[in-house]
Amino acid sequence: MIKKTFTPKAEDIQKKYYVIDAKDKILGRIATRAAAILRGKHKVTFAPHMDTGDMVIIVNAEKFRVTGKKLTDKKYQTYSGYPAGRKVTSLESLLARRPTQALRLAVNRMIPKGALGNKIRTRLRVYAGDKHPHEAQQPILLEI
């Protein structure tokens, strides 16, 4: 008997909302857990070619921790496309300017590139405070 590979159908996929409180949690641990949930790897029905993931809401994004000297040594770089258009920013200055951006970048860089990854990235919501406007969806609190 030949076994067929299981592929979930779009109507079979159940979407849920999860809340992660980033207060006093390590940046990488938050990002890996959020990326896995966004992709749907925690589900039995995971398929790498389909969007089976759930919605992730991260609150208290400015209160995460990093280990070692990452606040001063970790660098984020952007490039404008022009000669000498490279800009390098440390994690410390990025947090001072845009507190949610470091967490958003960490999660987004763990998601595959391409059309499916772009669709997955739209389900990540990051908030600096402890309030979010998604209470009507009855999100499930995740412990990390």
Image (tube, rainbow, N blue to C red):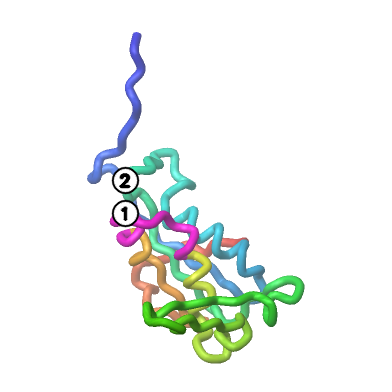
Comparing 65 with 142, the one in front is: 65
Position of residue 119 in the picture relative to residue 46 (left or right): left
Q: Are marks 1 and 2 in contact (CB under 8 Å)?
A: yes
The disc, 1 or 2, on the residue closer to the chain's N-terminal end is 2
Disc number at residue 61? none
Q: Give the range drawn in magenta.
A: 108-119
The residue tagged 2 is: 50
- In the image as oriented, which residue stretches furthest toward the left? 11
- In the image as oriented, which residue stretches furthest toward the front? 83
The quadrant of the picture occupied by the C terminus is bottom right
Residue 111 on the magenta span: yes
Mark 2, residues whose alpha carbon is within 10 Å: few (<14), some, or many (≥20)?
some
The residue tagged 1 is: 116
Distance between the alpha carbons at the discs numbered 1 and 2: 8 Å
Q: Position of residue 120 (x, y in %)?
A: 35, 59
- In the image as oriented, which residue stretches furthest toward the right? 68
Q: What residue type is labelled 2?
A: Met
Q: Where is residue 40 in the image (x, y as percent from the top left)?
A: 42, 49
Comparing 25 with 66, the one in front is: 66
